[in-house]
Image (cartoon, coloured by chain):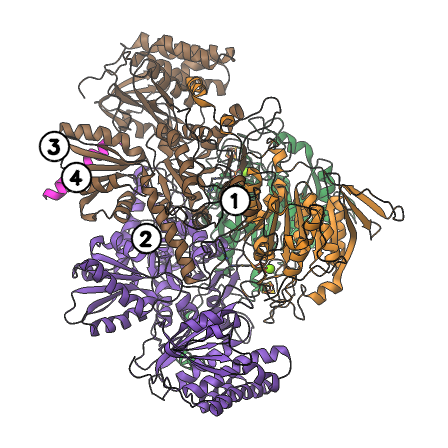
Chain colours: A green, B orange, C purple, D brown
Amino acid sequence: MSYLAKPKVHHPSLKKNAIGLTRRDYEGAISTLCAGCGHDSITAAIIHAFWELDIQPYKVAKLSGIGCSSKTPAYFLREAHGFNSVHGRMPSIATGAGAANRDLILIGVSGDGDSLSIGLGQLCHAIRRNVNLLYILENNGVYGLTKGQFSASADPGSISKKGEANTLQAIDSVLLALSLGATFVARSFSGDKAQLVPLIEAGLTHKGFAFIDVISPCVTFNDHEGSTKSYAYTREHQIEVVQSDFIPEREEITADYPAGSVRDVRMHDGSVMRLCKVEEDYDPTDRDRAYAHIRKHKDRGEVATGLLYVSPDQAEMMEQCEAIDEPVYNQPFERLCPGTEELEKLQRRFR
Amino acid sequence: MSYLAKPKVHHPSLKKNAIGLTRRDYEGAISTLCAGCGHDSITAAIIHAFWELDIQPYKVAKLSGIGCSSKTPAYFLREAHGFNSVHGRMPSIATGAGAANRDLILIGVSGDGDSLSIGLGQLCHAIRRNVNLLYILENNGVYGLTKGQFSASADPGSISKKGEANTLQAIDSVLLALSLGATFVARSFSGDKAQLVPLIEAGLTHKGFAFIDVISPCVTFNDHEGSTKSYAYTREHQIEVVQSDFIPEREEITADYPAGSVRDVRMHDGSVMRLCKVEEDYDPTDRDRAYAHIRKHKDRGEVATGLLYVSPDQAEMMEQCEAIDEPVYNQPFERLCPGTEELEKLQRRFR
Amino acid sequence: MTSQVNDFAFKIATANGTGSASANSLIMQTIFRMGIPVTGKNLFPSNIQGLPTWYEIRVSKDGYTARTPVFDLVVAMNAATYEKDVHEVRSGGWLLYDSTWPLDERLLRDDVTYIGVPFAELCAGAFKGVRERILMKNIAYSGALAALLGMDTEVIRALTKEKFSKKPALLDSNDRAIDLGFKYVKDNFDCPLPIRLERMDETKDCILIDGNTSSALGCLYAGATVAAWYPITPSTSLMDAFKSFCQRYRHDAETGKNRYVILQAEDELAAIGMVIGASWAGARSFTSTAGPGISLMSEFIGLAYYAEVPAVLFDVQRTGPSTGMPTRTQQCDLMLCAYASHGDTKHICLYPSDPREAFEFAPKAFDLAERFQTPVMVLTDLDIGMNDWMIPKLSWDDGYRPDRGKVLTAEELEAGRSFFRYMDVDGDGIPYRTLPGVHPRGAYFTRGSGHNARGGYTEDADEYQEVMDRIARKTESARKAVPAPIVQRRPGAKAGLITVGGCHAACVEAGDMLAKEGIPLDYMRVRGFPFGDEVKEFIESHEKLYVVEQNRDAQLRSLLMLDVAAPGTKLESILYYAGFPMSAHHVVAGVRGVKEKVLA
Amino acid sequence: MTSQVNDFAFKIATANGTGSASANSLIMQTIFRMGIPVTGKNLFPSNIQGLPTWYEIRVSKDGYTARTPVFDLVVAMNAATYEKDVHEVRSGGWLLYDSTWPLDERLLRDDVTYIGVPFAELCAGAFKGVRERILMKNIAYSGALAALLGMDTEVIRALTKEKFSKKPALLDSNDRAIDLGFKYVKDNFDCPLPIRLERMDETKDCILIDGNTSSALGCLYAGATVAAWYPITPSTSLMDAFKSFCQRYRHDAETGKNRYVILQAEDELAAIGMVIGASWAGARSFTSTAGPGISLMSEFIGLAYYAEVPAVLFDVQRTGPSTGMPTRTQQCDLMLCAYASHGDTKHICLYPSDPREAFEFAPKAFDLAERFQTPVMVLTDLDIGMNDWMIPKLSWDDGYRPDRGKVLTAEELEAGRSFFRYMDVDGDGIPYRTLPGVHPRGAYFTRGSGHNARGGYTEDADEYQEVMDRIARKTESARKAVPAPIVQRRPGAKAGLITVGGCHAACVEAGDMLAKEGIPLDYMRVRGFPFGDEVKEFIESHEKLYVVEQNRDAQLRSLLMLDVAAPGTKLESILYYAGFPMSAHHVVAGVRGVKEKVLA
Ligand SMILES: Cc1ncc(C[n+]2csc(CCOP(=O)(O)OP(=O)(O)O)c2C)c(N)n1
Ligand SMILES: Cc1ncc(C[n+]2csc(CCOP(=O)(O)OP(=O)(O)O)c2C)c(N)n1
Ligand code: SF4
Ligand code: SF4
Ligand SMILES: [Mg+2]
Ligand SMILES: [Mg+2]
């Protein structure tokens, strides 16, 4: 049983954030995942991001499906409500929760089996709806909890622990999301906290569906030689195509970057995602070029990571529904029920 | 009630094909769809294609889900088995049928509701498996049979018959298929039989999953001003990016085209798909360029049609399974059951 | 039948999508406004255009609203079903047909009076364009019927005026079409027929409404704010109605914002997931579907049951199994809804008998769902949901306030009130819950996996069982909370009639018929599951009980045996499941049949 | 207990993923090879590494194989559950623990003998590397047990040799670890304990096997060629086993091609769809799943029922509802499997009681599915499926030929034999079917929507009902075809014990115990649904019946009431549903409890 890997960043671990909470206040139950599981590192990054963003834990709702990855919401934000639903159906739960209470800060955690096999339809449609949700796909290429079958993200030719080669095409969740019109698409690696934390922060700030696919090796069933989702393989083939830094609203922006190399994307709440374009020809606000770029790396056997695409200004679900600004779930009954008189009037129609 | 639109091509309609059958022999029950429904034209094209390919109707299995489109398998090939399954689940039925009897010629007909909403997951995974199946998506942007709700292929801003504008992103099945590694991707228009027939012929010949999205206007619920799936709109915005002609194996190929403008793609059975590249920079064997090209037209508000991408040599499902060449369903029992002696031996393991 | 004044039935045969619907509702409304009790049953195909469709209208001065299979008059406007339709006329009845074309000799019956009106010809003369001629032909037969049955032409005029107030052109052509039919009949036949209408005063406190519309209205009044659905016949019009009501009553004029959210999901699994998510977050949320949807929702229904999340589902039943006959009615999901999902599960079900109860049970369903923190199923059917029923006007109590159940507020939590999600604090089996985003002390982890009374994950045998046993107690206590059965006793009755839902109308009528025959029967209609004590008592107090329902496998009988230990030996099934609404004739024949069987 | 030779139970507590599994099976096999009846129950968590896990071993010279909750000895290797484990030792029993660290005073019981062995210390001395030390610690305790219980060291040696024949290094360290434990105990305690093993000759015609493996073997022998599945505990190992059997027996050496297709589907809906598609095309096809899968398959199951397509489903039941406790056992899907899907549906179910019947029922399931053209469910559970059972060797009749049911061949069709898909030609309710791709005259359109006897689409009331009634007759006739119940009568018995599946072992033992107490009970174990006449007769011939099952809501009792009109008043439920396999103690206590209840 592994305890939470504590964040490795460099300030005393009991430092308080703007609302007076330490990172401990953002932790949850002790993880029951295997020692070294990538998912635990992602949990640590999530804790760090919420802490840095000064978010009140209880304003958050944590949602998941079923799988080792889907267990992780129990391991962070103990003061937030959690909903460990059924396999592959977290997106619909999140959609409903967001519809009822748009003030909730929604974070969904899923796995590649949960998201790309049984849950593929719901994931695609949540993207289409642009539900205001941070969706983290903890991608290890296998079904961990059921002991290591290939998932739909397993690459063709990747070798299972039993030694079998996968023959099927892999579903690349990032390309899929781009094809479906996702408004925030990122990919990262559980072993790269420095990259992951700002991405999570940006995702939480993004208004709409923020999709982050995180390669998260399964040490027990898919971290061996021949696996393309192992720590070793990912370290070798990961290429950060755009390095991003998240700057919360209140901090004013100091432009100490060599001109040209930097691009700021302003999120709807005024905060800024600062993108240092590691690669010249790359533009993370151009969907088609982003797509082509990722494919180009893919063809080279590389895994492009970073904030791959963002379009901060598209209407999220509740805006499309033209819903009131307050949550609908606790509207006073008087404002919901037309009452006797109206019923009288109304019934003239039915005579 | 509309009777089958008879093929409009120019030879006497009772001409016999190589196996001595007339097009009548490829027809089915009388359509019960609305007069003018695009689906009926597709049915006519299917009948024509099977006839031209000299296929024995009874060797075919016709599969569908639920919807007006899914009713159409009853309207062609009366001598073929049909399976009108449940809503959105035709791909799994087809996968199973193909696994049991790989000699079956499988054709699946579906609608945009059937394929892109409830059935999205199964469609994507059938593509991934490269099931040896011709899949025709009769795309009208609405749920016809349930009276005109928007489907997932309805374009943002498209106006419903009730006058409401669609706010959601459209799922473009062709881009989706390309992202998922589909090996044969085409788009056509029910009103363009000359284009549709050769595509169906090529699709039937393709070894693996052949996907054809056919814009097929719903005259009753989505053929009005403001709809982007109406006859008028489609006629105006359809652009044939690659004009294709199907040349069955036995006919030798006469190269009477201006050199350079033509490209032949040889299908696994020796037949040839002749592509006249209407557009210079287009290469239907380059997945990424095809994708970019389609997007380019989309951004211009155009609908690219034709054989958009083909890769004839990838292993279809049964090859990936390394299954025997004959169907497995009727293997002699002796070859399947190890018998008493083996059972004796085997059980030593369990002592 | 003795007198035929205001007491007969007729049937109109047309083709789908030829605009006969408006003609039929015109006829219905006219009779209704003449103060005469009337019901209509629409028998339509699973098709958009061209297939045969029938509309049955029953006029009953005694106020019987059940379907009757005996037709005094048939209007045969569809050549495709001509032969079938001629056979449907009762001996001594009338057939109204389009005499533009000569009638096939073989279709002539000498026990039927044929009334030929050259509708096509008349309309060809009076209207331009194929489409309009087809439409007007159907309006014209309502004119003919007006003359034959003695409808009040003033009422008709008034109705067309209201209907086409904004479309003068249409108004004109409709009126002309009506006159065509009316005049021709007046001039060529002596009217009215022995089956005819005479003004009454029986409908002034009633309305004509379908159950999907009234269910939607009930959800609006109950304060439902989130609805998620996937289109499926015959439930689609429920959500359509809810949407239009919301647009009218929940749209904030100034801000232009909506006080509701309706989500068309990608399928039924997503729809129920959205409902559960919304209910979990505190909204009154519901979905509407039909049998196939309930099957697909099964896994999620089990989650809501075990994790104790409220949810309201309307199952507008249609003929099963599988796709079955989507445009025919049945009561075939009774067992499924009561026990949906794997593992030990049991669900609260409500069974409205008509659109009025559908309206009343909607708020009840939300109250029960939130009180007992569990899914509640409201089972109607295609007949209740899509046909126009004559019912007493709907009424509403402005004093009604939703029962949101045991939800701890931020204040209570702030005040340090202890909270363990699945603990039986009050001894009623119902735990307290909290909503997300309200207070740190309210936080807990909702899960469908094993959990203990404190809400923690568990694989411990005792902890698991403690929660399961409490949930069982909770569901038990719901017996007292669901609507009690309707019970009517008749002097001298030894046996009883038991039924559910839309069979009510047929059973009431059958009860009267049987009583006249000297077979008085007590009557009980169950309205909620699990069944209350009254149900048990009624069964115990009779030696023989006829259980009337619309499915093949006697599902209501099964529920009675399982839930209140009704001895099967007592329960004689009367089943009708061919897809049409139940009629009194079926019930009477059934009772007689059983009696004979017993005697033999 | 009087004698403790070959008649005791012990329990080993370790942590998940520390390799204790191999130690435990070594112990099991040693006892088994000593000719002594033995069973093991593995109680593992829904987790991959680190959580507590227990392995229970029961030695029974009388051959009782049910779980017993009374432990003479507990091996406490997991500090996390130390306290719990100490309490599990029966009074007068023994506790074997790792004495490397001093024992917590508070855990000392004076009615228990503590046997301390410094496993960690011993292994630290003997092995290098953390991982190996942890693993070897677990091997070492088997050595200690060998000494304490008097296991035959020759047998152990032989076993390790076989096991590690290809890994000499591992063989060496294993043997050394065993010696460590063995020696230390020999040197420090007098061995063996009063609870000890002595060679017998009771196991030579038996094997140790789990039900998932034997089910898979049954499917292989039945000639299944297409399998589709989605991973889910506890059914996953069934498909794993099927795959490895196929690789061994269905792989064509020359061509390198496979005479089978196994598809890992994207979910359970797709899995059952593939099975239905494959069966429709003529293959013997099956899926394996657990409760949540059956819920998700519900819609498709209704299609197969109504369109009459064969399909075989293995439901390896686990503790529900919802996700429930995936690694605990229950019999909680009995009702769901019998009636899955909306509309009127009813399914053939088979209930094997152990791995041997699981093997035998597999071919039976395919025969029934193809004979009756309908889904057939084989219900096992986690206990049967995943635990090692001692059963008589499996046997096979080489004369067996699959019953492919009424399938018309190309020749028959060519010969002009008329074919109407849904017509009752033979009067047995079973129509003829054809396979796609075989012959033009065989063509028909399979659909879940309304169809008539000729296979055409219909919305006609009579045509629809004709097909539904025939299907009901067909299912009725299946009563005679399913395996008959096992019935055992005892002289002087007035009451009876009824059970299903894996409860058999506990009921057999309980029957003997109760007989000794002077309460002789007749016994019936149902094996197939719908129930045959023998079931009805057994119930009618007893005034009181105890129904033993592993679920909260008495689902078997419900099925008996619904399907053979068993009067509820007769049926007393004995329920255990906390997740562990049923034990005789529960049954005996249950019977006594009811008797007391009755007396009181
Ligand atoms: C309906 C249903 N089917 C199957 C399962 C079994 N199951 C649990 S987790 C899982 C896959 C998990 O894989 P993934 O989502 O990648 O999570 P990981 O364990 O790899 O993090 C499966 C198939 C289930 N719980 N529910
Ligand atoms: C499980 C289930 N849900 C809903 C329905 C109702 N339904 C029938 S067809 C259909 C949509 C059809 O749309 P599409 O696939 O686009 O076909 P079209 O009629 O437009 O050709 C729906 C929702 C159903 N039959 N089954
Ligand atoms: S099995 Fe794999 S995914 Fe699951 S906890 Fe262990 S390492 Fe992580
Ligand atoms: S409703 Fe639309 S899709 Fe359906 S048949 Fe009519 S035109 Fe075609
Ligand atoms: Mg995974
Ligand atoms: Mg459509």
Residue that appears at 50% across and 49% down = A90
Query: Marks 1 and 2, how far apart in space?
Result: 38 Å
Q: Which residue is mark 3?
A: D492
Residue farthest to the front? C105
* Mark 3 closeness class: few <14, some 14–19, many ≥20 residues within 10 Å: few
Badges 1 and 2: C-beta atoms under 8 Å apart? no
Bounds of the magenta span? D583-600
Asked if the magenta segment contains residue A215, the reply would be no
Query: Marks 3 and 2, how far apart in space?
Result: 49 Å
Q: Is residue C261 left or right of residue C598?
A: right
- Please state which of residues C508 and A232 is positioned toward the viewer in this rendering: C508
Asked if the magenta segment contains residue D592, the reply would be yes
Query: Marks 1 and 4, how far apart in space?
Result: 46 Å
The kind of residue on which mark 1 rests is: Ala
Q: Which residue is mark 4?
A: D593
- Determine whether the residue tagged by mark 4 lies in a helix, strand or loop: helix
Q: Which residue is mark 2?
A: C431
Q: Is residue B14 visible?
A: yes
Q: Chain of mark 1?
A: D
Q: Position of residue C203 (x, y in %)?
A: 35, 83
Query: Marks 3 and 4, how far apart in space?
Result: 21 Å
